[in-house]
Image (cartoon, rainbow, N blue to C red):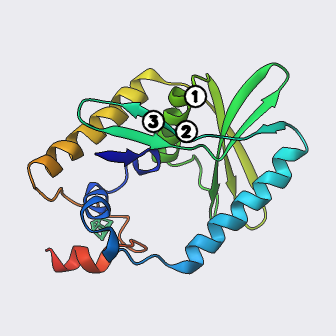
């Protein structure tokens, strides 16, 4: 079974539907456009300060499943590589979401790189927050995937998480399973 690094700490029910019923997903095309624009802005921002390197899809192998992912950017300044994860946001919150930090942390593990940063891009601002590889966050992330893997193996629909439903691409399917 294959999970993606970008799914870490997402609603477990959403992950279940994504794996079991991918054809039932309804993606809002506006959200996709916003994401692409964020990457273009980030590219211009990074080009001024760093040397950019291409990124590759990589996998982490766990007991019965794997986690794959490809970071947005890998950059070099001085002698050190860093991994960059880009997020387009309507408003920059006090701190980045925990699941974004965990996603970056998974990429750091996959790439064997110690440091990275999250670039949050809003309409009028770019915030760069630096993060170091964190083993305990990595362990918690693996536990998260393990629990979902066990639910899917047992053919159980995991519990949903409130707070993520508004723009959920499986909202209709989820409602019909309640
Ligand atoms: S609608 Fe809410 S609970 Fe259902 S899958 Fe989406 S985020 Fe999860």
SS state under label 2: helix
Residue 75 location (% of width, % of height): 76, 35
Residue of label 1: 111
Q: Is residue 10 above or below residue 35?
A: above
Q: Residue at x 55, y 42 (%)?
A: 57
Quadrant that contains the C terminus? bottom left
Residue of label 3: 59
Whether residue 149 is visible here, answered yes or no, is: yes
Q: Are marks 2 and 3 in contact (CB under 8 Å)?
A: no
Q: Residue at x 23, y 35 (%)?
A: 64
Numbered-mark total? 3
Q: Is residue 51 above or below residue 109?
A: below
Quadrant that contains the N terminus? top left
Q: Is mark 2 within 8 Å of ligand 1?
A: no
Q: Is residue 74 left or right of residue 15?
A: right
Quarter residue 122 falls in: bottom right
């Amino acid at each position: 079974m294959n999970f993606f690094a970008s799914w870490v700490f997402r609603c477990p029910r959403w992950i279940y539907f994504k794996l079991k019923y991918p054809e039932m997903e309804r993606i809002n095309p506006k959200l996709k456009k916003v994401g692409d624009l964020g990457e273009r802005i980030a590219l211009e921002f990074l080009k001024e300060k760093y040397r950019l390197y291409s990124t590759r899809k990589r996998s982490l192998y766990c007991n019965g499943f794997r986690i794959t992912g490809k970071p947005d950017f890998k950059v070099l300044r001085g002698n050190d590589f860093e991994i960059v994860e880009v997020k387009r946001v309507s408003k920059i919150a006090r701190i980045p979401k925990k699941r974004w930090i965990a996603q970056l942390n998974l990429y750091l593990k996959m790439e064997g790189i110690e440091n990275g940063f999250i670039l949050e891009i809003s309409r009028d601002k770019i915030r760069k927050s630096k993060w170091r590889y964190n083993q305990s966050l990595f362990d918690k992330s693996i536990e998260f995937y393990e629990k979902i893997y066990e639910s899917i193996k047992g053919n159980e629909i995991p519990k949903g998480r409130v707070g993520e439903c508004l723009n959920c691409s499986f909202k209709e399917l989820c409602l019909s399973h309640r």
